[in-house]
Amino acid sequence: MNRTRHDRRVRAVPGVLLVSAGLLVPAATAIAQQPSRQIEEIMVTAERRQASVSDTSISMSAFDSDFLSDFGMRNQEDLQNYIPATTIQPYDITIRGVGRAARTLGGDPGVSTYFNGVYSEDFGIASTEGGLFDLERIEVLRGPQGTLYGRNAVGGAVNFISKRPTDHYETEIQATAGNFGTFEFSGILSGPIIKDVLRARGSFTHRERDGYIKDTSPFGDDINDLDDRNFALALEFTPTENLTFYVRANDRRADRRFNGGDGTFPIVISQNGEPMRDTTNLAFGWRPTPEGQTPDRVFSHPVTGAAVNASRIRPGIDSNSPLNEEGMRDSTTATSTTPNYAFGFDPARAHVFDVKNTSADDLLVDTNGQYREQFDHNAVQFAANWDRETWGLQYTFGYSDFLYQRLTDEDKTGNTLLGSHDFYVNQKNYNWQHEVQINFNIGDNVNVTAGGFLYRSVIDQRLDLHDPIDVQGRYQDGAGIGTLSPQLVGAFLEGADFSDDEDPIANPFRNEQLDIFSAKAAFLSGQQPLSINGSTQLFAPWFGDRGTALRQGIETDGTFFAWDNSVTTDAQAFFAQGTWDINDQWALTAGVRYAKDKKDGQERLFTVLEVPSLIEADALGGLMLLDNPLEVALGLGAPVLNPNVAQAFADPACATSQLCLMNVAGGAMALDPEDMQVKPIGPEGAAVRFNGAPLALSSYLPLKDSWDVWTWRVNLDYTPSPGHLVYASATTG
């Protein structure tokens, strides 16, 4: 049952200006005018019933299939130039400044996205299916839509509507070719299977393109290519004239070498504070230049503007300085726990991008062959409509799942002298939803839409930084402290007393190999309570990772940071909206919605830390420099200083650095007899530790919360004459 106020219908308008005020305030007046020249009218379902754009008192933009085809629309970013007050990013949309506050796993968008009336958590998935091919129209609603589009619609709502199967046979083939090997091939086949009863529509889209950012390494193809395929099949069954069933399913696969996600890029703009690639230093960072020495660089103090002399940090020597008078660490000389993977790289292959003076030929990268991104997306939309003379009932079901994977070379170099710094992402999304909606009339001038909404979403995400090559075994192999083995370090830590009379806690240190699930298991078994910040944390010596730190997804050797998260969202809502046609010119609309969301999530983290305090401690700090630490610890012998450590005292810089002495004792650094300075041995030696003793951390943080809210809408329409609409609206979202 679709009820329309025929007295206010106009055949065609060239455009509609509908302006609403913002959140919680009355809307400004908006007028739709009809000049002498007329164009085809667009029918929309912005208010969950079919009406023309000019009869819809919502600030909106609508684009039909002819517009999308005539203007060559291929993706969501092409739409941005035609939608007022809207910006579109690769995966998100912002309307009137309202969008996704943070792209975190539990975060929701500020603009809701629908595909054939089914809610989608990800604008990027819904807006790129099939390259906008075979769409009937796109509706963009601006401002809060808190009654009929209640879920995450504070900024607005976007609805992508596919073309329905036809009563007549219809075929269409499109092909496009261009430079960089661009080729797009799309087609549809539609028509009746059983006349007037069953119709079908099939469509496909295949888009491919070569990369246009040249990869000068021998490991892979050029970057920013495209291979995107989508297949869809829709059926429409009409057993009676007032009963309709519609179902559509699609399968999409996309695979490309890409230029990085939001905020990342494989092209290096600067490094270590300079506009060039650093290939000569093992680690990044600066330290204050000692008095009387020539600085490597002069900086300006950000507050006083005074010149500050700086020298490069000495890897394995300079780290977090001791505690100052306030008990805080001075981080001005702190270094990273990861090495400079461009160290020893051929400078001719170390491309740096000049922002000011560039051309297309300057876009060069050198990688290990990664930068691969893959989508696998499946979705089903089902709708059943039962229309009667004075009422109508509609049921909508939606299911969607997608798997997103990416593998990127985060060190942005094809150099493998030390290893590689790779980033793997694996995210799986599933969601189901049900909506029941009833439309009915009360008398001749009141129309009501009411219904209920039920939704569940499950998201599992894995983020994994790893080194699959790891020449020195920095992450794949176990690491002690100086001459102490990992097992001996663990024995000391496990036996330490961490209890407090007022707030006793279990000792978080373990003498065993940790993985990403260790902390959760300890919490669930009662071995380790939640800490003050709500998480459970376990520490252990670094026993290395040979693909065992993670127990789901692909194996990644040498994982040094993994973040495994999951969120389950359950939502329900009830809504009602009615329109009272007061007379031929005036109409009043009022609506209300109640919504409740519940989120249940968990964060699991696994990483390696380099802790300065352990090597500064008297017990471990002294033992780690000995040639016989176990005998001394057990009281079975006199201490014997490691001979390499004894030689290292000849370098004053090392003699005063506990970090340097630990690296020497562990076989990572040695005294150079030519200049009498302690230096890293190189790839054939052990991995240099840049901050302190390597420890494994496994953390578990359970999260749970729920919210509920009432939203409403009041709208007054005034139609002074056909072709003119003035309205004022107040809406919450």
Image (tube, helix red, strand yellow):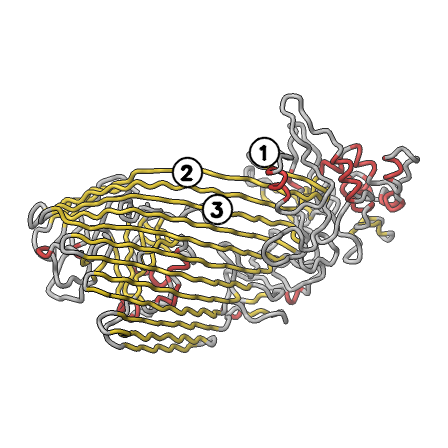
Q: Residue at x 32, y 44 (%)?
A: 573
User: Which residue is outermost to the top?
Assistant: 502
The local crowd at label 1, few if under 14, some if 14 to 19, many if 20 or more residues have their Cα within 10 Å, is some
Badge 1 marks a residue whose secondary structure is loop
| Up-down relation of residue 261 to residue 599 (above or below) | below
Q: CA distance from mark 3 to mark 1?
A: 19 Å
Q: Amino acid at mark 1?
A: Leu
Badge 2 marks a residue whose secondary structure is strand
Left or right of residue 656: residue 391: left
Residue 706 numbered mark, or none: 2
Q: Amino acid at mark 3?
A: Val
Give the camera-side residue of 314 and 531. Answer: 531
Q: Earlier in the sequence, mark 1 or mark 2?
A: 1
Q: Earlier in the sequence, mark 3 or mark 2?
A: 3
Give x and y (percent) for residue 163.
Answer: 29, 67
Q: Which residue is mark 3?
A: 567
Left or right of residue 328: residue 25: left
Give the camera-side residue of 24 and 575. Answer: 575
Badge 3 marks a residue whose secondary structure is strand
The local crowd at label 2, few if under 14, some if 14 to 19, many if 20 or more residues have their Cα within 10 Å, is few
The local crowd at label 3, few if under 14, some if 14 to 19, many if 20 or more residues have their Cα within 10 Å, is many
Left or right of residue 137: residue 538: right
Q: CA distance from mark 1 to mark 2?
A: 21 Å
Give the camera-side residue of 605 and 301. Answer: 605
Q: Amino acid at mark 2?
A: Ser
Q: Residue at x 25, y 42 (%)?
A: 731
Q: CA distance from mark 3 to mark 2?
A: 13 Å
Residue 530 numbered mark, or none: 1
Picture quadrant of residue 319: top right
User: Which residue is outermost to the right?
Assistant: 637
Give x and y (percent) for residue 489.
Answer: 77, 40
> From the image, which quarter does the C terminus lie in?
top left
